[in-house]
Amino acid sequence: MKSFKLSFLVFVLAVFSVLPNSVLALDLRTGSQVGINPDEEVTGNLYLAGGQSKIEGQVDGDVSLIASETNITGIVEKDLTLAGGHINIAGEIKGDLRIVGGEVFVRGKVHGDTVVVSGNVHIEDTAELVGDLLVVGGKVYISTPINNYAKIVSGHVTINGPINGQSEITTQQLVLGEHAEVNGNIRYFSPTKLQQSLSAVINGDVQYNQISSFQDSNIFKKVVLSFINFWILLRFVTTLLLAFLLVFMFRVFSQRVNDYGIEHFGQSLVTGLLSIILVPVISLILFVSLIGFPLSVLLVLSFIFIITISSAVAGIILGTLIHRLIKKADHTEINFQNTTIGVIILTVLQFVPVLGEITRLVFLVVAIGAIVNYLYQGIRFRKGF
């Protein structure tokens, strides 16, 4: 965990150091269907958020993507980070590939490392993985050659291609299919020995380590920790993307919420605490009432929306507050640079025991209180965003 803290700090400092250039080169696209066409080339970083997404052209920078269904057949010159339901990677990724998904298919070429956390993972024979592989999934099927280091944690693993490097596998059941060829080393942890097809070939070393249950392996604990670290990084990126949307697309809303949160910090804190306590209670009371049921649903959905954007709003408030204190200014217009500082600090605070978590929680509650007040004022006086 200490090494991850250091890596994360280096990462966010690197993000901040190149922020002005990144913002200028940023391409953000949202909608029910988003992406780039086969003849299109994007210079700089690309951010996609929508129902269905596709990349058929070329992106010269990093790609961050959130969608229910994703199809990548084009070229990404740098890293690809995405989250979604059904994901198909059939193009070429020249950096690292990081995925959190439901059903994932990797059919293309990945020059960097591949990290996948998914329900089911299919790495097919058309795929080419140049870097290392880390997979956490329910069922994992690998048909392509694995030439470097691979670490897999899954309920069921099927290897149906060459293993030329070193692999560590923790699973309930390991299967070597008819096209499996072990030329490197496999070290696996499982309650039972592997199942081997008659046509599978083992030229290398296969080490079996029996465990009484899936959770008993230290490898499992290490990979789960890696997943948590990756999830923290993914949450940081998505919070930053959400903050960008708020600052640039909902600027009036964000500015007013920010100003109220800073100028009425204590009141926002109390409002946030009361909202967290009272909204579930009021929703439950309305829910059991036939007349109040629609209002209950509306209240719950509204509060889910507030919780969803609260981390980004907290970053805006913290970043602007720090800027005010440093510059000794009475008022500061929100901007993405200050917001990024706020989001980075909020993310780093979760690594600080007790005091850091308390501070982070306070700003999140203040953000909730400021949003609730803004919505209340908007309903009361019919103010627009």
Image: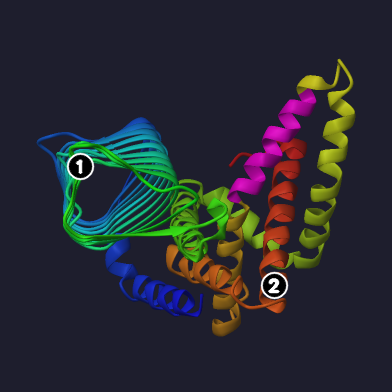
Indicate the position of residue 364 as horizontal and vertical percent values: 67, 60
Is residue 173 shown in magenta? no
Determine whether, in the image, residue 369 is placed left or right of residue 45.
Answer: right
**Depth order, front residue of 17/118:** 118
Residue at 38 percent across and 73 percent down: it is 11
The C terminus: image quadrant: top right
Would you name the residue on which mark 2 appears? 359
Would you name the residue on which mark 1 appears? 200
User: How many marks are shown on the rendered structure?
Assistant: 2
**Residue 321 location, quadrant:** bottom right
Indicate the position of residue 366 as horizontal and vertical percent values: 72, 61
Q: Which residues are magenta?
A: 295-309
**Depth order, front residue of 164/74:** 164
Residue type at mark 1: give it.
Ala
Indicate the position of residue 315 as horizontal and vertical percent values: 56, 63
Q: Which mark is residue 241?
A: none
